[in-house]
Image (cartoon, helix red, strand yellow):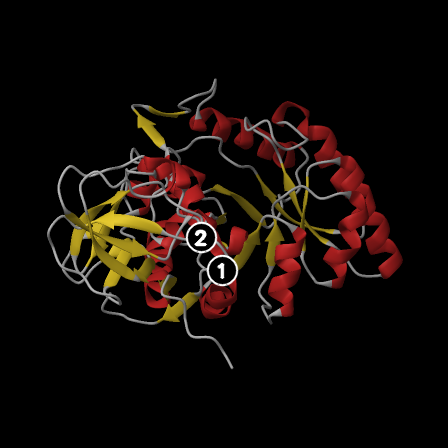
């Protein structure tokens, strides 16, 4: 028998994702769009998101090789860029599964050329240049040697060239600044443009797909669009930072739902949950929700979050447990089975955002979404009215 859907589950509105992608296209056209599906589609469930969105995207991006192979195994045929670092010994998997290899190190470039020569068919490559992130191997001021090496490769397909912004979120006239570092997004873009001049100097065409813009750059930095953009978190309806321009209208696609599994009157002086971190001075109705930190509802949020029960917001109380948490309804009634929303919008209009959860947890919306555990079922719907 197939067990019933858990009371705690994530509802993903695929129609919202499609609309978000259309809004991004309208902003960046004629640039193509690569949708990032790494980290289980930012926690939304890649097995449901990828087959639905494949017809509407030009390219797909992931972080690691395993994610790309999984997409091929579930039938995804669109080009897939593996953006994370790859060891030379992993290159054969790219040819076997028709994946696009990110190269930022000569050793990986050499491995791809040797394999392509032996196989008689090319590995598809995007060269990645570090313009200020200090994460990839080849930095902008040493890029010429890698580009020259790539020109000597006769058997691989150098399809793309790209970089990644360390911080394109914050708008500060006249430049986009890095909040916590030494550089500017505009500086990174200038460095990347200098790298591109290598091809002009040699009177040869640059790679077919040049791309730099992540979600924040799509919103803030139109001069970074080039041939393709790479929306990540904004594709899922979440702005990457409070300070980003809202130049594209997007809407969250995920609603995290649950139900009341226990409702009781808690007497004054009776502490709630582990550690006795919350106690009421008057009789109150508390309810138990079957969602805890093993589901991705962070323990460090204890006594901070609000939860929507039957369309109204209430305070979470007591230590968040591995599998459960408790909510104070004051004097309002509730019964077993009543609807709970941990993230998303209720029909009453009340809403809990990923930004709210991030604030309570002391993190960002990216971590909130990607930490929703695999044991939380994903339910996929197509509701154009939501």
The residue closer to the viewer here, 80 or 1, is 1
Furthest toward the bottom, the residue is: 1
Q: Element type at marker 1?
A: loop
Quadrant (top left, top right, bottom left, bottom right) of the C terminus: bottom left
Furthest toward the right, the residue is: 118
Q: Viewed as shown, does residue 156 lie left or right of 238? A: right
Residue at x-position 42% and y-position 24%: 178
User: Pointer 1: residues within 10 angstroms few (<14), some, or many (20+)?
Assistant: few
Q: Which mark is residue 367?
A: none
Residue at x-position 43% and y-position 47%: 293
* Place of residue 292 in the rendered image (x, y in percent of width and height, measured from the top left): 40, 50
* Place of residue 364 in the rendered image (x, y in percent of width and height, measured from the top left): 39, 38
* Place of residue 330 in the rendered image (x, y in percent of width and height, measured from the top left): 14, 48
Q: Viewed as shown, does residue 236 lie left or right of 158? A: left
Q: Which mark is residue 295?
A: 2
Q: Quadrant of residue 308?
A: bottom left
- Answer whether labels 2 and 1 touch (C-beta < 8 Å): yes
Residue at x-position 34% and y-position 52%: 237
Location of mark 1 (residue): 375
Residue at x-position 53% and y-position 52%: 38
The residue closer to the viewer here, 214 or 120, is 214
Q: Is residue 287 visible?
A: yes
Q: Element type at marker 2?
A: helix
Furthest toward the left, the residue is: 331
Q: Quadrant of residue 198?
A: top right
Q: Is residue 251 visible?
A: no
* Place of residue 319 in the rendered image (x, y in percent of width and height, measured from the top left): 35, 40
The residue closer to the viewer here, 330 or 2, is 330
The number of callouts visible is 2
Q: Is residue 236 above or below residue 222?
A: below
């Amino acid at each position: 028998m197939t067990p019933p859907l858990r009371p705690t589950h994530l509802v993903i509105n695929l129609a919202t994702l499609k609309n978000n992608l259309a809004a991004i296209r309208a902003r960046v056209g004629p640039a193509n769009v690569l949708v990032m599906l790494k980290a289980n589609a930012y926690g939304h469930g890649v097995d449901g998101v990828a087959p639905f969105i494949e017809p509407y995207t030009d390219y797909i991006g992931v972080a690691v090789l395993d994610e790309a192979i999984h997409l091929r195994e579930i039938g995804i045929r669109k080009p897939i860029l593996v953006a994370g670092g790859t060891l030379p010994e992993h290159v054969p998997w790219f040819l076997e599964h028709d994946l696009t290899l990110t190269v930022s190190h000569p050793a990986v470039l050499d491995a791809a050329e040797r394999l392509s020569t032996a196989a008689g068919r090319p590995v598809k490559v995007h060269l990645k240049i570090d313009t200020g992130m200090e994460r990839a191997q080849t930095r902008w001021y040493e890029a010429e040697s890698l580009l020259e090496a790539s020109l000597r490769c006769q058997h691989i397909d150098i399809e793309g060239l790209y970089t990644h912004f360390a911080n394109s979120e914050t708008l500060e006239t006249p430049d986009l600044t890095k909040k916590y570092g030494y550089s500017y997004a505009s500086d990174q873009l200038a460095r990347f443009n200098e790298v591109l001049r290598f091809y002009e100097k040699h009177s040869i065409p640059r790679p077919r797909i040049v791309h730099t813009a992540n979600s924040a750059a799509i919103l803030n930095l139109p001069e970074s669009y080039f041939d393709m953009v790479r929306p990540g978190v904004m594709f899922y309806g979440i702005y990457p930072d409070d300070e980003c321009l809202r130049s594209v209208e997007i809407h969250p696609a995920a609603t995290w739902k649950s139900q009341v599994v226990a409702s009781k009157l808690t007497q004054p002086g009776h502490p709630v949950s582990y550690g006795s971190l919350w106690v009421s001075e008057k009789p109150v109705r508390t309810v138990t929700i079957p969602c805890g930190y093993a589901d991705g509802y962070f323990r460090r949020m204890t006594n901070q979050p609000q939860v929507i029960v039957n369309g109204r917001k209430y305070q979470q109380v007591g230590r968040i447990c591995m599998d459960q948490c408790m909510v104070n309804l004051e004097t309002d009634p509730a019964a077993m089975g009543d609807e709970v929303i941990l993230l998303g919008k209720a029909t009453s209009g009340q809403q809990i955002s990923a930004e709210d959860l991030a604030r309570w947890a002391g993190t960002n919306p990216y971590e909130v979404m990607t930490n929703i555990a695999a044991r939380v079922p994903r339910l996929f719907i197509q509701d154009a009215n939501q």
